[in-house]
Image (cartoon, rainbow, N blue to C red):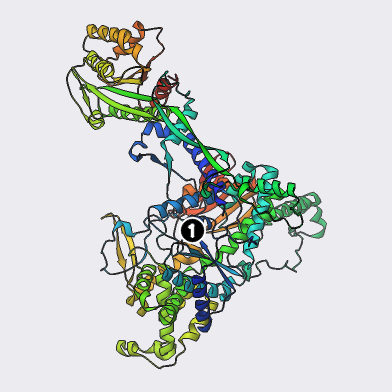
Amino acid sequence: MVLNIEQDYLRFRQIVRGKIKQDLKKYISQGELIGKKGKDFVSIPIPQIEMPNFRFGRRNAGGVGQGDGEVGTPLSPGDVDDDGAGQAGNAAGAHILEVDLTMEELAQILAEELELPRIQPKGTNRIKTERDHYSQVSKVGPESLRHFKRTYKEALRRQITAGTYDPMNPYIVPIHEDKRYLSWKTKAKPESNALILYMMDVSGSMGDEQKEIVRIESFWIDTWIKTNYNGVVTRYIIHDAVAQEVDSDTFFHTRESGGTVISSAYELSLKIITEEYPQDLWNIYVFHFSDGDNWSGGDTDRCINLLKAQLLPNVNLFGYGQVESTYGSGQFIRELENNISDVDNLVLSRIENKDDIYQSIKDFLGKGK
Amino acid sequence: MSFVVQSTGHLLTPELERSRVQIEQYAREYGLDFYETIFEILDFEEMNMVAAYGGFPNRYPHWKFGMEYERLNKSYAYGLHKIYEMVINNDPCYAYLLECNHMVDQKIVMAHVHGHCDFFKNNIWFSKTNRKMMDTMANHGTKIRKYIDKYGLDAVESFIDLCLSIDDLIDHHSPFIERRSKPTEKVDDPPMVKKLASSEYMDNFINPEEFLQQQKSKLEEERRKRRRFPEEPQKDVLLFLIENAPLEHWQRDVLWMIREEAYYFAPQAQTKIMNEGWATYWHAKIMTERALTDAEVIDFADHHSGTVAMHPGQINPYKLGFELWKDIEDRWNKGKFGKDYDDCDDYVTKREWNREVGLGREKIFETRRVHNDITFIDAFFTEEFCNEHKFFIYQFNPDRGVYEIADRNWKSVKQKLLTGLTNFGQPFIFVSDANFDNRGELLLEHRHEGIDLRIDYAKDTLKNLQQIWSRPVHIKTLVEGKAKMFTYDGEKHIERKLDG
C-alpha cells in the first residue's frame, strides 16, 4: 500500500522549514537550540503552527479527577492535563510543537538563509571511501531486488512480439528471461576531513554573557562545517597569560583571571596543527574569540607575525571574533585590521551583543572557504 | 487474479476471520444491532496514517494530516501510545486492527468495535450523520485535488487553513431543529410622524409640510438601520459565511465540504463518554462471558485494566462511561429508581435495595438510544455513584503552586463535568450582526459563561475570519469581567472597551 500521507507529510515539513527560516535570527541569537541538540537531531520548538480557533483560556481553571485523597491533597504535576482540564473531550491542547530536524537540514536552512556558499574543500583526495549505488538493472539477481516495472515491461514486450498479448484480456505473465533486478555499482568517494580549533580568551574580563555568545557561535559554526565534511574533529584551547588545551565543557565554563597573552594561544594552536594535522590531509578552521584586550603591544606584534608567517598560510580559515566587554579596550582587532591586509582567509568580526551573532556567522562562513 | 480496489489494508487471516465471525455472532446474541462491519489489518505506519486522516484514508490533502502523522509516529516510536483500534461510522462500518497485536487483543478490539458500531447505528445523535461518509470523503478529496490543479496549491491550501480555523463554529443541534422561523406575516406599518396638536387653521404653520416630510424620512432611515442582518444571532457561523461571504465558487464549495465534515464528526465528540463506555462495557461482557479462553484471561485483564485506568487529574471517558453503564444496569435490575427509592433516606436500606425487577438490560439499550453525554451525566451521575468512584474537583492553589483536591461534593463535581461538556468545552460564538455599524462589517458575539477566551488565539482567528469576510470583523466578549470588543480590520488588531 502506498502511503497517501507522504505528500501531506512532506508539505508539513516544508512549512516547518519555512517557519524556522522565518525565525532563524531569533533561534540563532537566543541560542535555545543548543540545549535541544541530540546526537543527530535537534528539536526545534515552533509556536502555533496549528490552526487558531476560538477557545477558552483555561489556565488554572481546574477540573474533575478521580481517586483517593482528602480535600487539600495536591496532585502531582504530571497528572493534570493543563489544557484539557475539566473536559472529557479530546480537544488537542495548545502545545508548542517540537519538530525534529536533522543537523543536515538545519545546516541547509542556515545556508539558505545566510546565503552561505558551499565550502570547497582543499585538494585532499587522498583518503577514499567506497559506497554502493543501486543505479543499474541486471538480468540476474536476488528476488528481493526484482524490478517490478522493468520486468513487467519486458514481459509485455515479449508477449506482444510473440502475439500472445490480448488487449481484451490483458494478462501479463513474466517468465524467467523477463525478470530484471536492481544492481549496484561501487563508487569510490573522496573523503575530506576537517579540524575546527576554537580558542578563547578566559581572562577576567570575559564574562558569562561573552562566553554565551562564543558558545552560540561555535554551535552554528560546527553545524555548518560538519555538513560539509565527512569527518570533523574539534579541539579547544583557552588562554589567559598562558594557553592550554581543554575539553569542550571546560572551554565553555572555565573562568580564569589575570592577564592576556594572545600569542601563547596562537603558538599552541600552531603546535597542534603542525604536529597532528598535516595540512595536505586536513581542512583546518581556527576561530579565536577574545575581548580584544591584549597584555602588551609587543605581544600583539608577535601575534601578527605568527599569523602572517605561519598560521594563515596553513589554514583554510582563521576567524577572529571580538566580543564586546565592559573591560576590554578592543584594541586587538584594530591592530589586525591595520597590519594584515590582502589575505583572504582571515575574517574579523565584531560581536557587540547577541543580535550580532547572526551577522558574525555570516561573516565567518560567507567566504566559502 | 483480482484486487479489491477499495481496500486500504489487508484482509483478515483465517484465524482472525474465525474469531470475527464468532464475536459478531456473540454480539448479535446479546442484542447488539449494527451495520456490516469490515475489518482490515494495518501495520503501525498505516495505522498512524489512517488515524492522522481521522479514519479516512482518502481524505483531501492538507499538511495538518502530515503534522498529525508525525506526532503519532513519534509518540508511537517513544512508546507513549499505541492505537489499538479505529472504527468508522459508515454503512458498512470500517474498523482497523493493528497487525502486531496479540490474538487476545484483536479479539477485545473486535468486541469493542461491535459496541461502537451498535452505538453509531442506534444513537439518535448519529441518526442524521452521513452513512456513506467513506465515499463522501473520497469525493471531497477528488474535488479539492481538482481545485488545486486549477487554482494552485497555495491558494487552495491557504483557504483551507482559514476554514479549519473556524470549523468548530457550527450549530450542533441544527440537524434536528428548524432554526429559521418563517417570515412573519405581520405587516410592518409605515412610520407615522406625530403631529403637534393644533387647531385646523394653524396646522399649516405649526406642522409645516416640509417638516413632516423631513421627520418621516428620518424615521425611515432609522428603521432601515435597525433592521438587523441576520435577524437573530446565528450559531452556524460556517453556514452564514457560505451563504453571505463574498467568496468564489470553489471557495464556497471548499467551505461547504469542511462544514459537512465538521457536522459528521460532531456527534462523536458529543457522545464520547457514552460511546467509549458502551464499547468497553460490551467488550468486557462478550469477552468474559463468551469469547475468552482460559489461557487468555491474564492478558485480557491486563489490557482491560489499561483501558479503564484512572489518572488522578483527568477523566478517562472509557472508565467513566463503563462504570456508569454498569451502574445503570445494576440499578434498574434491582429497582433502585423511582419515587420510593428516591424518598428513602436510610443509607443501609438504600444500599441493600433489591426489588429484582430485572430491567437493567432494557434500560441500557434505551439509554444508548436517546442520550448524549450531557443528558447522560445529568440523568445518571448520582451521589452514590460519585462517592463510590471517588470523584473530586481539583483547583490550582496559587499559594502552594500546585493543583490540589478542592471539593468532593457530588453536586459540584457533576456541575463541573457538565460545564466541561457544554458545547464540547468550547465557547459559544454567534454571528450577531453582518452589517455592523451599517458598514458591512461582521460582528460576532461570545456568550460568556464564566471563562474568558484565549485572547491570542482569538485574535489570530479573527484575522483568518477577516480574510473570508473581506470586511473588518469584530468579536464582543468579556475579559476579566469587562466587556471588550476585538477587531481586525485587515491590517491591524484593535481592542476596545465597551460600556456596560
Q: Quadrant of the N terminus of chain B?
A: bottom right
**Coordinates of residue B125 in the picture (x, y in percent):** 57, 72
**Coordinates of residue A101 in the picture (x, y in percent):** 43, 40
The amino acid type found where label 1 is placed reads Asp
Q: Could you tell me which residue is drawn at 39 percent across and 89 percent down?
A: B343
Q: Could you tell me which residue is drawn at 62 percent across and 64 percent down?
A: B133
From where the camera sits, is residue B285 visible? yes
From where the camera sits, is residue B240 visible? no
SS of the residue under disc 1 = loop
Above or below A4: residue A281: above
Nearest the camera: B101 or A168?
A: A168
Q: Could you tell me which residue is drawn at 51 percent across and 52 percent down?
A: B499
Find residue A325 and report its image quarter.
top left
- Tag 1, which chain? B
Above or below A369: residue B9: below
**Coordinates of residue A28 in the picture (x, y in percent):** 40, 32
Find residue A27 and report its image quarter.
top left
Q: Badge 1 is on which residue?
A: B43
